[in-house]
Image (cartoon, helix red, strand yellow):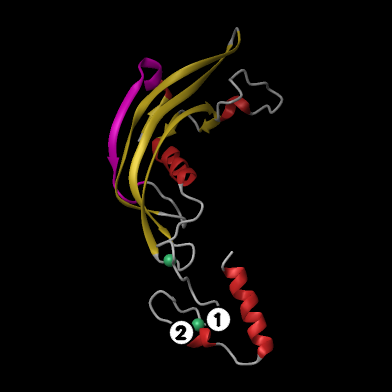
Amino acid sequence: MDFKISELEREPIDFDLELAPGAVDLGEEAAQKGPLAASGHVEVLHEHRGPRDIVADIRLKGRFDGKFQVPCARCVEPVEIPLQADFDLIFRPAAADADPTERSITAPETEIGYYQEDSLVLEDVLREQVLLSLPVRTLCKPDCKGLCPRCGADRNSQPCSCDAGPSDPRWEALAGLRSRIESK
Ligand SMILES: [Zn+2]
Ligand SMILES: [Zn+2]
């Protein structure tokens, strides 16, 4: 869905929709499962930089709610997680800040994004917001045993024989070190 600046100049737009899986491309990090609900309010904010220099910013305030699939940090099995977040964002025309010395009069705590040409694409905004709200590390279960670092077997489903370990004491010292590292 595109929000065109010419339409927003006439009146603000309220939206409430469901995006089908695949509508928002999340790359390798996550996959959308089921519909992604997104709703919000979009309007133009005029930034007066000078008597004849008015920049048309777009303010997008909204939220999303959906289910996503991410790989377990230990065993890489897909894990389904619900995610929802509210956002309140300002987008400036990409051309408006072409001069890096230009000082912005917008409040410094407001995060500024940019829109290209004459419209803001909702799917692009959602992609960024979903990726930002992904947990840093997801486990399929708190005690996931992960993959064996030696043979690659998923130790949740098939105990491999690597754990038996060699009997040489020097190797056992190393194995002890390895388990201390892993348990951190
Ligand atoms: Zn796991
Ligand atoms: Zn193994």
> Relative to 151, is 56 above or below?
above
Q: Residue 92's x, y, as percent? A: 53, 26
Query: Which span of residues is magenta-colored?
Result: 7-23
Residue type, numbered disc 2? Cys
Query: Which of these two is toward me, 2 or 148?
Result: 148
Residue type, numbered disc 1? Arg
133 left or right of 81 in image: right
Q: Residue 174's x, y, as percent? A: 66, 80
Label 1 crowd (10 A; few <14 / some 14-19 / many >=20) = few
16 left or right of 76 in image: left
> Relative to 52, is 117 above or below?
below
Q: Residue furthest bottom?
A: 167
Tell me, for residue 160, which label it has, or none.
2
Q: Is residue 31 magenta?
A: no
Quick check: is the Cβ at mark 1 less than 8 Å away from ligand 2? yes
Tell me, for residue 95, which label it has, or none.
none
Residue name at image x 58 percent, y 69 percent: 182
Q: Is residue 14 magenta?
A: yes
Question: Which residue carries the number 1 mark?
Answer: 150
